[in-house]
Every structure is written in structure tokens, then in C-alpha cells.
Image (cartoon, rainbow, N blue to C red):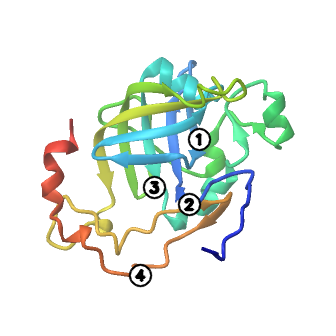
Amino acid sequence: MNTPHVVAEPHILYLGTPVVLISTVNEDGTHNLAPMSSAFWLGWRGVLGIASASQTTRNLLRTGECVLNLPSVNEVGAVDRIARTTGTYPVSEFRQALGYVYEPDKFGRAGMTRVASDTVSAPRALECPIQLEAVVAATHGIGEDSDQLRGFISLIEVRIQRVHVHPDLLMEGHANRIDPDKWSPLIMSFQKFFGLSGQVHTSRLAEIPERAYESLAKV
């Protein structure tokens, strides 16, 4: 059967994922803030794909905690200001070739405000509408079958400890439900920023009450 598709070999497969600003604590007690978009959630667990040599990964493995700050489309400027910065000094040759520069004050460069967290040492970014305090639950390798990829990327599983949400995002009459019609996450697709265009179709999954997943939420 003929199809309209062609075979392609894109250099990257960033097909569209939410942007996350991960805040962590550096060895000297200062704070790092790093944008990334290889993240997903299941219940109150998150999986983060991060370069193994990054300052964020080192901080995560050393302290075992972080905050996942979720920017909306309104915070895109702040995210882009730290897009090619690193908290690691000296900057690796690989990142230098990509145009990265050392920035010890990511919060200042982004123009974001540090706010103390309740359950972890890493600060929250005040301007982000959703902030997830988290601790490291496990680490996993990726590309272990490849000599070229082995050790280059880390998959870090985190357990969410506390969720902070701007009240404007909550569903009317529900203290614990985020309204997807009000939440507009910043999306990265093939290294470009996008927002959501709005619901395009009703969903039978949405007919399942969120409380049905409560038994899996905080385990």
C-alpha cells in the first residue's frame, strides 16, 4: 500500500514537550536555574532527561532535590535569556561550540525571583505559575547499548513532594484541580517555543474523574 509519507532522518526528535526550569543548589550554596524540555509526569513522579555532565545533574545527584518550575507562555522571555548559559565553569568544549557561556547568576539573568520552598532547599521561581518541589527517587541510564551515548545523558526519576499553583489556574469550585483551559504551558518543539492553541476535540479520558487516580498520586 502506498502512503504519502517519506523516510526522513531528522538530527533531533524534539517533537514537542513542556519547558521546565529546574532550580537546584550549587556546592557553594548559590542557586542554579536551568531550562530543559525532556520531561514527563506519571502521577506524582517525574522523569527528567538531562546531560550527565551538566551542573543541574551534578547538583541533583549531590543534594537529591530540586524544584521543577513550569513557565507559561508569558515567561518565554525569561526562559530564552538563560537558554544558552551554563552554571559549569569552565564551559566544556562541546557547549562552547554551541555558543554557551558561563553564568553564575541564572535567576538574575532570567529576571526571576527566588522564593523559599517548603520541603526542599532549592528555591522556587516566583514568576512560574506552577512549581513542583521534588526529591530524587532513582537514576537510570539511557543509550547504554551505544558506546557513543553511554554516560552522556542521565534519566532522573523524581518524586513530587509539594505542588504550588497560582490560584488563577484552579478550576472553579475545586481546590485541587488545575483547569486545562486556564493553563497555557510553554512548549519546546524542534528548539522553538510554542504555546497551546486550545482544545481541539473532546476527550473520553477526561470523563474519568481525576480522583480515580488518587491511589497512585503520592506513592
Q: CA distance from mark 4 to mark 1?
A: 32 Å
Q: Residue at x 41, y 58 (%)?
A: 129
Across the whole image, how many numbered discs are drawn on residues? 4
Q: Position of residue 73 (x, y in %)?
A: 53, 67
Residue 37 in the image: above or below residue 180: above
Q: CA distance from mark 3 to mark 4?
A: 26 Å
Mark 2 vs mark 1: in front: 2
Q: Residue at x 73, y 60 (%)?
A: 8
Badge 1 is on which residue?
34
Badge 2 is on which residue?
16
In the picture, the disc for residue 122 is: none
Badge 3 is on which residue?
128
Q: Using a 10 Å C-alpha cutoff, classify the residue at mark 1 as few (fewer than 14 neighbours), some (14 to 19) or many (20 or more).
A: many
Closer to the camera, 43 or 175? 43
Q: CA distance from mark 2 to mark 1?
A: 18 Å
Query: Which three-letter amino acid code belongs to the residue tagged 4?
Result: Val
Q: Residue at x 66, y 27 (%)?
A: 146
Q: Of marks 2 and 1, which one's residue comes earlier in the chain?
A: 2
| Quarter placement of the N terminus | bottom right
Residue 3 in the image: above or below residue 44: below
Q: Of marks 3 and 2, which one's residue comes earlier in the chain?
A: 2
Closer to the camera, 142 or 112? 142
Mark 3 vs mark 2: in front: 2
Q: Of marks 3 and 1, which one's residue comes earlier in the chain?
A: 1
Instruction: Check contact, mark 3 vs mark 2: CB within 8 A.
Output: no
Badge 4 is on which residue?
200
Q: Secondary structure at mark 3?
A: loop
Determine the image quadrant of residue 63: top left
Q: Secondary structure at mark 2?
A: loop
